Image: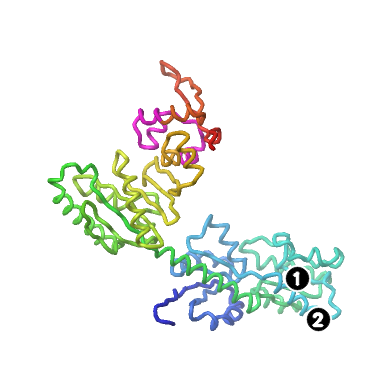
C-alpha cells in the first residue's frame, strides 16, 4: 500500500449451502487485500433466517450464494438493516454452460431436460427467443419456502420416473446428493469464477463507498436559547460544557467538544449522528441537555464531505432552530436536505439548494425561498394542498399574523384560492381554507 493511501477492509458474511463453499472459495485469493470472507453454511432452509439474524450485525454486508436465501429473507423483512446481496448467474454464464453441455452431449434433446434455475420471473433467461416451443425444457416453478428442497427434488424425480427427462440442470446445490442417489443425471450450475469476481468486487466497492459516507464528518453547533443577558452567559456555558461532557461519558460518541464565543461545537461522524438522532427523527443530545439544564438550548447538525461544509451546514441548521419558538434541533445532510425540528410532529424535510425557478417564484410572490420550500414540504407531508392559516402557523412555527400575511400574498399572486368549510358544532364564520398551487403563478 502506498504511503498516504488506505483501503477499507470489508467484512462479508457468506451464507451458503455447504456444497457451494468450494465454488466461492475460488475467488478468495483474488480479493483478500480488500475483503475478508466468512462462510456461514446451512444444510436446511429453515436455518437461514436464524443464521442471518444471529450474524448480520457483525459484517459490513451479507452475501448469499444464490437467490434462494435472499428471497426467503425478503419475505420476512421489508428491508435489510445490513446490506444484503446474492450471487446471480448472468445470461452470458448460462449460455456458455448450455453450449458446453450441448457440446458434450451431442444427442441431448433440451425438451427432455428439466431446469430449476429458469422461470418466468427471470424471463426464462431469454430461452423463449432461442428455442422453439417443442424444444423447450421443463421448468420448475418453485416457491421460496422451507419445503423448496423436497418439492424441487420430488418434481425432478416424478419427471424422471415418468420417463420424460434425461437430465436435470439445477442451481440448488443441496439436492445434488439426492439426485445422485436416485440415479438422475444432473449438472449443478453456478456463476463462473469471472462473474463471481465481478459481482463481489462491485459489492466491495459499494460497501467501501457506503462506509466512507457513514464516516463523513458531522458537526453540531449548540447555542443557549434566548440568551439576551450576557452577565450570566459564562455560568451557563460552564454548565452546558459540563452537561455535554456528562452526556458523552455515557454515550461516548462525540469525538470533540469545544467552546466557541457564544456556542459549543461538537464533532462526531455521520453514522454516530444517525444513532444519536435515531435516523434523523429525534435528538438524544437535545433531550438530555434540556432535561438536565435549568435553561434551554438549540442544536444545529451539519454533515459534509469536508469539515468546512459540515460546519457551515451546522451553523445554518442552528440558525433555523433558533428561529423556532421552542428549543429544537435541525439537521442539514451532505446533499443539503434540511430536516427538522427533530422529534416534533411539525418536522419537515426540504432541500437547502437554491433553484433558479424557485428564486423567480420567490421574487414574484414576495415570499422568501425558505418559506416556499417549507410550504411545499408541508403539502407533501400532509398530502393535501388545502391549508388554513392555523395549519401554516403551527407547522412552520409562525405566528397566526405571519401565516395570514404569507397566505394573503399567495392569494394576491394567484398561488392560492380561498374556499370555506363549515365548522361543525361551532358558531361563527366558516373556516377559511387556502388551496395552494404554485404552478398557477406566471413567472418570467
Q: Residue at x 30, y 44 (%)?
A: 322
- Compared with 269, 24 (above or below) is below
Image quarter of residue 429: top left
Q: Which residue is mark 1?
A: 157
Q: Residue at x 36, y 48 (%)?
A: 330
- Compared with 76, 42 (above or below) is below
- Residue 225, position as x, y percentages in the image: 24, 44
Quadrant placement of the C terminus? top right
Mark 1 or mark 2, which has the lower sequence index? 2
1 or 2: mark nearer the eye: 2
- Residue 254, position as x, y percentages in the image: 29, 61
Is residue 252 found inside the magenta-colored segment of the image? Answer: no
Task: Determine which of the numbered discs, if any, sits on residue 338 in the image.
Answer: none
- Residue 289, position as x, y percentages in the image: 25, 50
Dot 2 crowding, Cα within 10 Å, few <14, some 14–19, many 20+: few
Tell me if 230 is positioned left or right of 196 in this view.
left
- Compared with 219, 95 (above or below) is below
Q: Are marks 1 and 2 in contact (CB under 8 Å)?
A: no
The answer to whether residue 132 is visible is yes
Q: Which residue is mark 2?
A: 103
- Residue 231, position as x, y percentages in the image: 12, 45
Tell me if 415 is positioned left or right of 221 in this view.
right
> Considering the numbered disc 2 on the image, is that residue within a helix, a strand or a loop?
helix
Q: Residue at x 27, y 63 (%)?
A: 256
Dot 1 crowding, Cα within 10 Å, few <14, some 14–19, many 20+: some
Image quarter of residue 126: bottom right
* Colour setup of the view: rainbow
332 and 210: which one is in front?
332
> Considering the numbered disc 1 on the image, is that residue within a helix, a strand or a loop?
helix
Range of magenta residues: 376-405
The CA span between labels 1 and 2 is 25 Å
Q: Main secondary structure of the magenta part?
A: helix
Amino acid at each position: 500500500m502506498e504511503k498516504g493511501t488506505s483501503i477499507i477492509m470489508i467484512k462479508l458474511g457468506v451464507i451458503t449451502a455447504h456444497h457451494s463453499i468450494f465454488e466461492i472459495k475460488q475467488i478468495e485469493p483474488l480479493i483478500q487485500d480488500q475483503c475478508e470472507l466468512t462462510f456461514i453454511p446451512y444444510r436446511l432452509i429453515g436455518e437461514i433466517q436464524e443464521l442471518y439474524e444471529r450474524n448480520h450485525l457483525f459484517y459490513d454486508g451479507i452475501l448469499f450464494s444464490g437467490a434462494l436465501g435472499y428471497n426467503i429473507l425478503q419475505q420476512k423483512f421489508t428491508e435489510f438493516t445490513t446490506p444484503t446481496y446474492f450471487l446471480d448467474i448472468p445470461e452470458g454464464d448460462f449460455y456458455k454452460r448450455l453450449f458446453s453441455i450441448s457440446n458434450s452431449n451431442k444427442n441431448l434433446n433440451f425438451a427432455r431436460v428439466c431446469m430449476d434455475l429458469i422461470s418466468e420471473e427471470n424471463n426464462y433467461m431469454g430461452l423463449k427467443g432461442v428455442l422453439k416451443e417443442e424444444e423447450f425444457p421443463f421448468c420448475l416453478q418453485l416457491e421460496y419456502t422451507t419445503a423448496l428442497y423436497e418439492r424441487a427434488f420430488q418434481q425432478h424425480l416424478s419427471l424422471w420416473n415418468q420417463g420424460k427427462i434425461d437430465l436435470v440442470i439445477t442451481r440448488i446445490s443441496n439436492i445434488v446428493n439426492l439426485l445422485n442417489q436416485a440415479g438422475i443425471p444432473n449438472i449443478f450450475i453456478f456463476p463462473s469464477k469471472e462473474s463471481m469476481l465481478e459481482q463481489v468486487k462491485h459489492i466491495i466497492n459499494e460497501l467501501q463507498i457506503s462506509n466512507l459516507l457513514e464516516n463523513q464528518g458531522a458537526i453540531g453547533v449548540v447555542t443557549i436559547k434566548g440568551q439576551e443577558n450576557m452577565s450570566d452567559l459564562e455560568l451557563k456555558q460552564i454548565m452546558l460544557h459540563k452537561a455535554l461532557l456528562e452526556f458523552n461519558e455515557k454515550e461516548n460518541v462525540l469525538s470533540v467538544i469545544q467552546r466557541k464565543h457564544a456556542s459549543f461545537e461538537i464533532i462526531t461522524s455521520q453514522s454516530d449522528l444517525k444513532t444519536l438522532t435515531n435516523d434523523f427523527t429525534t435528538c438524544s443530545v437535545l433531550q438530555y441537555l434540556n432535561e438536565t439544564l435549568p435553561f434551554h438550548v438549540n442544536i444545529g447538525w451539519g454533515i459534509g464531505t469536508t469539515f468546512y461544509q459540515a460546519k457551515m451546514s451546522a451553523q445554518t441548521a442552528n440558525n433555523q432552530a433558533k428561529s423556532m419558538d421552542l428549543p429544537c434541533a435541525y439537521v442539514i445532510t451532505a446533499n443539503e436536505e434540511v430536516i427538522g425540528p427533530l422529534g416534533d410532529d411539525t418536522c419537515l424535510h426540504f432541500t437547502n439548494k437554491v433553484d433558479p425557478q424557485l428564486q423567480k417564484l420567490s421574487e414574484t410572490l414576495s415570499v422568501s425561498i425558505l418559506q416556499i420550500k417549507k410550504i411545499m414540504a408541508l403539502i407533501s407531508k400532509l398530502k393535501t394542498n388545502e391549508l388554513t392559516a392555523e395549519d401554516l402557523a403551527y407547522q412552520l412555527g409562525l405566528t397566526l399574523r405571519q401565516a395570514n400575511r404569507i397566505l394573503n400574498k399567495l392569494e394576491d399572486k394567484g398561488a392560492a384560492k380561498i374556499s370555506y368549510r363549515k365548522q361543525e358544532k361551532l358558531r361563527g364564520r366558516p373556516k377559511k381554507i387556502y388551496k395552494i398551487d404554485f404552478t398557477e403563478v406566471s413567472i418570467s
